[in-house]
Image: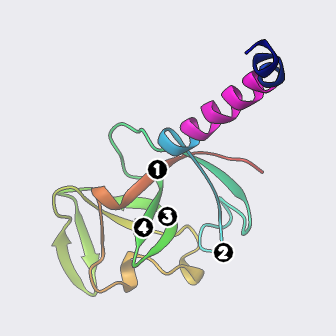
Amino acid sequence: MKKLLGKIQPFIIPITVTLAVIILFHSIFMLGYVPSASMEPTLDTGSLILGLRIHGELKTQDIIIFRHDGTYMIKRIAATEDEQIVHNGQTETVPENCFYVLGDNALDSYDSRYWEDPYVKLEDIMAKLLLPVT
């Protein structure tokens, strides 16, 4: 038993730290990158980003990471629930627990303006941008 404990002991701290980091990034933080120019100049293409999975109320101007059609995207919230937007020439009200999002680079952004259902649902939001890493 002492021999086994002696062999395992040097690995206890690294294993504990590794497990703690895995748990933190699985439940609290989200590490990602910006795959396109849609958020330039705020976030450069290829920038690493750190998101916070646990967030409070989301507001207009917050940058979020979310799922849309099976892909992760990062955009800025342009309107929240009950706010009025103009979409395809018609004034609409953003539904409850939904967001209308736009990229900062309007000329190179696939965002709510182009989607059949222009809203991001609250349950599709993975994280709120905490900070760019690079």
Gap in angstroms between the C-alphas marked 4 and 1: 10 Å
Give the magenta-colored segment's residue range. 11-24
- Give the residue type that dot 2 points to: Ala
Compared across the picture, whether 41 is left or right of 38 comes to: right
Please state which of residues 83 and 9 is positioned toward the viewer in this rendering: 9
Q: Amino acid at mark 1?
A: Ala
- In space, the residues marked 2 and 4 are separated at their CA atoms by 18 Å
Q: Is any atom of residue 79 visible in this view?
A: yes
In the rendered view, tell whether residue 4 sits above or below residue 64: above
Q: Is residue 62 visible?
A: no
Q: Nearer the viewer, mark 2 or mark 4?
A: 4
Q: Amino acid at mark 3?
A: Lys
> How many angstroms separate mark 2 from mark 1 (CA)?
20 Å
Q: Which mark, by number, is residue 127?
A: 1
Q: Amino acid at mark 4?
A: Arg
Identify the residue position indicated by label 2 in the image. Answer: 37
Q: What element does badge 3 sit on?
A: strand
Q: Residue at x 40, y 39 (%)?
A: 55
Q: Earlier in the sequence, mark 4 or mark 1?
A: 4
Name above or below for residue 131 compared with residue 18: below
Report the coloring of the rendering.
Answer: rainbow
Which numbered disc flags the more N-terminal residue, 3 or 4? 4
Q: Which residue is mark 4?
A: 67
